[in-house]
Structure formats: C-alpha cells, structure tokens
Image (cartoon, grey):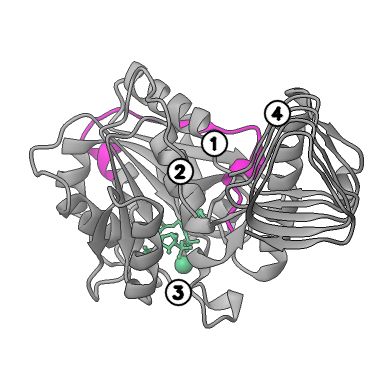
Amino acid sequence: MKLRQREKAVSNPSAVIVLAAGQGTRMKSATPKVLHTMCGLPLVGHAISSAYEAGAADVVVVVRYQRDRVVEVVKALDENVLIADQDEIPGTGRAVQCGLNSLPNTLTGTVIVTSADVPLLEPETIQQLHALHETNQNAVTVMTTIVEDATGYGRMVRDHGALVGIVEHRDATEEQLEIKEINAGIYAFDAEFLRTALGKIDTENDQGEVYLTDTVAIAVKEGRRCGAFILEDQWQAQGCNDRAQLAELRDEMNRRILNQHMRAGVSIVAPCTTHIDVTVEIGPDAVIEPGTILEGDTVIEPYAVIGPNTTLRNVQVGTGAVITHSFLHDTEVTEGTVVPPFTYQNN
Ligand code: UD1
Ligand code: CA
C-alpha cells in the first residue's frame, strides 16, 4: 500500500496539518479509527493523499491514541510525512498547536487543517479553500456546509452576515442551536496568526478542551478578516464516526471511483457489484464484468476483460488479456493471455 506520486499545484499551501489523535470510540474497535480502510487506503491515507495532491509542501499528522500503530502505517504510506505527538492537553486547538511545533517556527503563508476521518475531501477543494483564503487575505477561513440536522456540529455564528464565531453544539444557546450552517472542521489559516492565536485560547467550555474554533472569535476581536468557504458537495465534509458511516462513505467513494473510470473509457457492466480501490489503474476499452473486485496496485491495460466474479490484488494485466471467475494476487498476466476460469494464482 503506497501513495502515488503526484504533480504539485501552482499555488501551494505551506503545510497541511491532519488531526488524527482521537480514539474514535464509536467505532467500537481495537483498531484506531483512522486506520480503518476504505477503497484501498486507511482513512488517514486518504487525508494525506489529498493534502499532497493539493500541493502541500509539508504534511503533518498529529497522533496520540495508539500512536505507534498509526505512525507505522503513515510512514509506510509516505516516509516524508511529519509526525507530531499531542500531549495530555486535550482539544483540536492543542492538536494543531502540537502540529505547528513540528514545523519551522519561521513558517509563513497558509496552513490548512484537516481531519484524518474525512476521507472524501478532494484536493481541488483544499485548493479552492486555499485560493479563497489568500484572495480575501483572511486570518482564518472555515469550510462550512448547510445541513438539515446540525446535531453535534459546531455552529457558524454570524452578525448581519459577517462571521463572528463558532459555538459547539454543547455550548450553544437555544437560538444558536437553530443555525444550520455548520463547521466542517477544515480550515485555512495565516500561519503567523494561527501561532499567536493558539497561545491565547483557554479551556472555558463544556469539555474543558482547547478549541481550535475559538480562533475565529480571536480574529474578529483583533479586527482581522475571516470568512467561510461554503461547500456544496456535502459528502466531502462528511466525517466518519461509526461503522455504519464508514460503509456509507465507502459506498460513495467507490461510486466516485467507478464514475471516473467510466468517464475515462472503461466499461463497467454492473457498478453496484464492482469494487475498485483508489490505487488501481485501468486503460480505456477494458471491460469490467459483474462481481469484480480490483485491489491494491493492480494495473489493467486496454481491451482486457476482467470478471465476472473475479478478484485481482496487485496484478499487472496486459492488453487484451481475459480473466473470469478467478482470484489472482501479486502476479502478472501477459498481453492476450486467456486465464482458464476458476484459477487461483499468485506468482
Ligand atoms: C469539531 C469542531 C466542530 C466541527 C466538527 C466537524 C472543535 C472544537 N469543534 O468537533 O466545530 O463541527 O469538528 O466534524 O474543533 N482531535 C485531535 N486531538 C484532540 C481532539 C480531536 O487530534 O485532542 C482530532 C480528532 O481525532 C478528529 C478531529 O480532531 O480527527 C476532530 O475532533 P472531534 O473530537 O471529532 O471534534 P468534534 O467534537 O466533532
Ligand atoms: Ca469531540
């Protein structure tokens, strides 16, 4: 499992800090939430991949819960990722502060903050957030969405349309609970503002935590500009808290992966029964028959026919090869080969 190399974008964030220190209690799992997998990568892998693809010079992952396990997986995905350990002081604000401390204290420009459990966030969206933030010369820009049921989320508090702060659900007044614009937990910050603002946040809230969201009120108080980037594609801001949400998000990601392949000229006969990892490459005019699962570093050349009922894991398939009713892993099928049905093959 490795992330692919990517081209850098034109205007780049200085750094992306990915928050991954939480336990994820509602997964009811011995495995940390951010290591649960979806379409070929752990949740934290999707977050790292989007961060690099958005052009970040540095990506920092903030860890704490089962940190050794998380670090091992992260480093195997990309050894360039910086690791920051969060101490015993709780809260998203503290997590970001720990992340910042692993970057040079002279860092300037824009720092993006994302969460390791928001796997559908796309690199283009991070770039748009970044562009809006820099164009408006904001101290902080918050990604938000409008939802029908805002239960549990931080509410965006506005005064005559201008953002004045974020209040957590549990700290909100009756009136604030009516607000439908929520904080998606993804932000762009001016690095210098972030560094000084984090030093000013207390823990005067219902959870006794250092809230990153308090930076907005600080910006307003100091007369700095702040704003919101309202996201229309809500899937991209959707966090994963339990296994039911994990399954929903995986379904949606799979749908998006299949659509990309179909638009690029791949025939997928029965999308509902087909699963393709984000790491898989398929050439145009390949045909993917029903019940096919394509995993890992699988590469399929044009005109190949895969399936029905076939699983390929890390398999190189040559042009025009045919593989039906089979399970192959870590192997190669050369151009034009017809693999006999019901084959099990590794090497
Ligand atoms: C946070 C926001 C809330 C927003 C929501 C979006 C704050 C105070 N609130 O709330 O406004 O609507 O996200 O999902 O920021 N984490 C750490 N260290 C910590 C605490 C959290 O790394 O000490 C990480 C978690 O692993 C997670 C992310 O930060 O990846 C968000 O933490 P979580 O506890 O889920 O925040 P919420 O309470 O949902
Ligand atoms: Ca929480």
Q: Which span is picked out in magenta?
A: 218-240
Residue type of the residue flagged with mark 4? Gly
Mark carried by residue 23: 3
Residue type of the residue flagged with mark 3? Gln
Residue type of the residue flagged with mark 2? Ser
Figure check: 220 above or below 277 = above
Residue occupied by mark 4:
283
In the rendered image, residue 70, in percent from the top left (x then y), is placed at: 39, 68
Mark carried by residue 122: 1
Mark 2 or 3, nearer chain start: 3
321 relative to 186 in the view: left or right: right
Identify which residue is drawn at 16% across, 32% down: 108
Residue type of the residue flagged with mark 1? Glu
Identify which residue is drawn at 52% across, 46% down: 184
109 relative to 301 in the view: left or right: left
Q: Distance between the residues labelled 2 and 3?
A: 21 Å
